[in-house]
Amino acid sequence: MHIEKIELHNFKAFRKLEIECNRNFNVIVGENNIGKSTIFEAISLWKLAYDRLIQERDSTRFYKAASNYYLPFSELNQIRHVDINDIFNRFRI
């Protein structure tokens, strides 16, 4: 699988972040406490949601569904959080 672009909207400390990925090699570097781990948490959350909500179900039915699908908060153990408010950015766009 190749990730072409990472987009975060109101996720943890990020209001909006867009990263265009190189097909061959990508490195995320920076000072401490600027969000590098948060980017990987977002990718991990996306992968969990993709596997649980799309791959394990009939994907054609998933995209046409009238109801919402949810991941239980208790299953989000790969993200550093205390409660659900830790996942969403407090400052809305």
Image: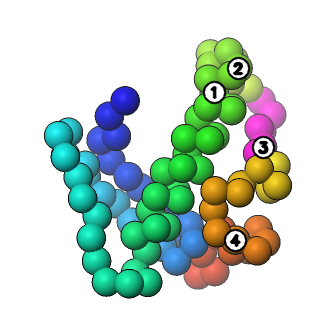
Q: Report which residue position mark 1 lands on.
A: 54
Question: Looking at the rendered structure, which numbered label has been put on residue 81?
Answer: 4
**Position of 77 relative to 17 (above/below):** above
Residue 87, image x and y in percent?
A: 66, 68
Question: Viewer-proximal residue, 92 or 44?
Answer: 44
Whole-number angstrom distance, CA of label 4 to CA of label 3? 18 Å
Question: Viewer-proximal residue, 36 or 15?
Answer: 36
Residue 54, image x and y in percent?
A: 63, 27
- Residue 74 appears left or right of 9: right
Q: Are marks 2 and 3 in contact (CB under 8 Å)?
A: no
Q: Are marks 1 and 2 in contact (CB under 8 Å)?
A: yes
Q: Mark 4 packing: few (<14 Cα in 10 Å), some, or many (20+)?
A: few
| Local secondary structure at mark 1 | helix
Mark 2 or mark 4: name the one nearer the start of the chain. 2
| Local secondary structure at mark 2 | loop
The structure residue drawn at horizontal position 80% and vertical position 56%, both measured from the top left corner, is 73
Say which quarter of the image contains residue 81.
Answer: bottom right
Question: Looking at the rendered structure, which numbered label has been put on residue 70?
Answer: 3
| Local secondary structure at mark 4 | loop
Q: Are marks 1 and 3 in contact (CB under 8 Å)?
A: no
